[in-house]
Image (cartoon, rainbow, N blue to C red):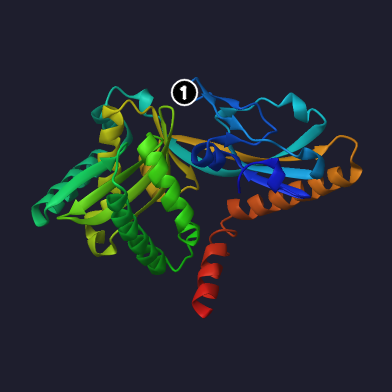
Amino acid sequence: MTGTASTYGELGKAKLVFDLYLRRCVVPLFNPCVRNTLLDAQWHFTAKPDSAAADRVVVVKDIPDYLALEANPAWEKFKHLEVRQYGGMLIALNRYRDLEDYLNNQLSKRNRKNLRAKLNKLNRDYPISFATYHGAIPREVHRRLFDAFRQLLAQRFQQKGMANRDLERWSFIEDTSLRMIRSGDASLFVIFSANQPIALTLNFHVGSMIYSHMQTYDIAYSSYNLGDIAMFKQLEWCYNNQIAAYDFLIGESYYKSKWADFPYRYAYRIYYRKGDWFGMGKARLLQHFYQVKQFLRDRGIAGKIISRDRWRYKRQRND
């Protein structure tokens, strides 16, 4: 999805937070100056050309509640309905003096001890090194790392028995990340054993905030808690580079709850033209549909008992 109205047709859709950090653009419904209330910062993006006349209903998904959006006066003929959706989690790093202060406040004494024990054991057992690529990166290095990234991500999701949507659009992610790492708008964190990547995380940067887009690790190293070690080393880098917040994005999990200190909510907005009774009716039906869907999520039915990604994985295996 490009985030521009010209792509929407009769029912337009956009994913706001992903458009912001992946494409640096805002749907034309909004002023391209977006305020981050968490950091008290103004972010300026590109407003794409629109062809709103063709659209009856536009759904803008994934609006985090810490972003304040101003309406674009050119869309004053549109009204909207809002639907509360799933939760997100982030680390407000600017609340703490340094990494040690954060760890002491966020992790239990037992978790801190276990983290350092696992890191020490990993360093004893293997020739471990850490790297963060943020700025210049040779194309051949990037290609080699992303080949490993794709392989490890595929193995991890095969282990989970789930489809991964980033694997299905890998060329876009790979090409976009190369350009944005070089421009400083993204970073790639890697844990190496000798010269072999065993854990990778792709992050996108907006101002002093990081959006963690995807991460994986070599399942052969599962006993070392590589996810926690990767998080610890990334936060070390964040404090050394004046990063104020680290956003895990959509969804809640034990891992995110362990590290995150700031839960928030996403919302959908459903826009329709004033006076368009058919569009208003369609918008209300969509509102009801999304409310029911979230009701099922809140009760662990949608996404857990009934998982679209597990169903897609089985279908892909059968195909």
Question: 221 or 33, which lies in front?
Answer: 33
Task: Tally the marks.
Answer: 1
- 308 on left or right of 180: right
Q: Quadrant of residue 153?
A: bottom left
Q: Compared with residue 34, is residue 117 higher up or lower down, i.e. above or below?
A: below
Query: Residue 210 lies in what quarter of the image?
Result: top left
Whole-percent x, y for residue 25 in the image: 57, 35
**Residue at (26, 53) in percent of width and height:** 225
The residue drawn where x is 76% and y is 27% is 74
Q: Secondary structure at mark 1?
A: loop
Q: Is residue 311 left or right of residue 186?
A: right
Q: Is residue 307 visible?
A: no
Instruction: Note whether residue 214 is visible.
Output: yes
The residue where tag 1 is placed is 39
In the rendered image of this protein, does residue 225 appear above or below residue 55?
Answer: below
Q: Horizontal and vertical percent for residue 315?
A: 55, 74
